[in-house]
Amino acid sequence: MLYARATILTLNGHRDIISDGTLLVQGNRITDIGKTDDLISKYPEEPVTDLRGRIVFPGLVNSHVHCAQSLLRGMWIFISLFLRFNSACNECIYLIFVYCVALFNTVIELYLICKCSKGKCMRIFF
């Protein structure tokens, strides 16, 4: 699929901006990039999506994660439940719930990091 006639911010070493640019996307990878006329003539059989008036730039993935902070996510729910039902809750059960939620969130964070590191996070949105 050719995504054509967009302004493309490459964010390469020279910070090139391609006016009237086109991307060739095959599967989930950008396989070619250049001026619209050049790529349309190079790949005449590819379907074309017109992106005139739009800007295309690389997606930014924030891989900066604090797994220790992930341990705290969701804990306020259990803290509020504990404070509300303190007489009915056993502190040990409460701490086990907190630990399980923290562990679950950490596993989810690590899964997302591994998934993104294998190149499976590439998505194209318009």
Image (tube, rainbow, N blue to C red):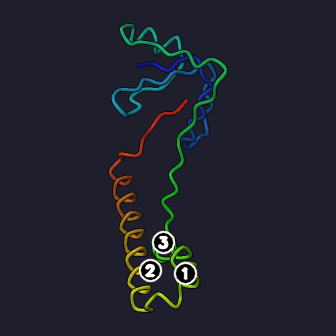
Residue occupying the far right of the picture = 53
Counting from the top left corner in percent of width and height, residue 69 is at 52, 75
Position of residue 49 in the picture relative to residue 121 (left or right): right
Q: Which one is in front in this view, the residue at disc 3 or the one at disc 1?
A: 1
Q: Which one is in front in this view, the residue at disc 3 or the one at disc 2?
A: 2
Position of residue 55 in the picture relative to residue 4 (left or right): right
Badge 1 local density, few (<14 within 10 Å), some, or many (20+)?
some
Q: Are marks 2 and 1 in contact (CB under 8 Å)?
A: yes
Query: Which badge, 3 or 2, comes first in the chain's sequence?
Result: 3
Image quarter of the C terminus? top right
Position of residue 119 in the picture relative to residue 83 (left or right): left
Q: Is residue 51 above or below residue 41?
A: below
Counting from the top left corner in percent of width and height, residue 40 is at 46, 11
Q: Which residue is mark 2?
A: 98
Per the rendering, the mark at residue 49 is none
Residue occupying the far front of the picture = 88
Label 2 element class = helix
Label 3 element class = helix
Q: Which residue is mark 1?
A: 79
Q: Amino acid at mark 1?
A: Ile
Query: Which badge, 3 or 1, comes first in the chain's sequence?
Result: 3
Label 1 element class = helix
Per the rendering, the mark at residue 70 is 3
Q: Amino acid at mark 2?
A: Val
Image quarter of the N terminus? top left
Q: CA distance from mark 3 to mark 2?
A: 12 Å
Q: CA distance from mark 3 to mark 1?
A: 16 Å
Q: Amino acid at mark 3?
A: Ser
Query: Which badge, 2 or 1, comes first in the chain's sequence?
Result: 1
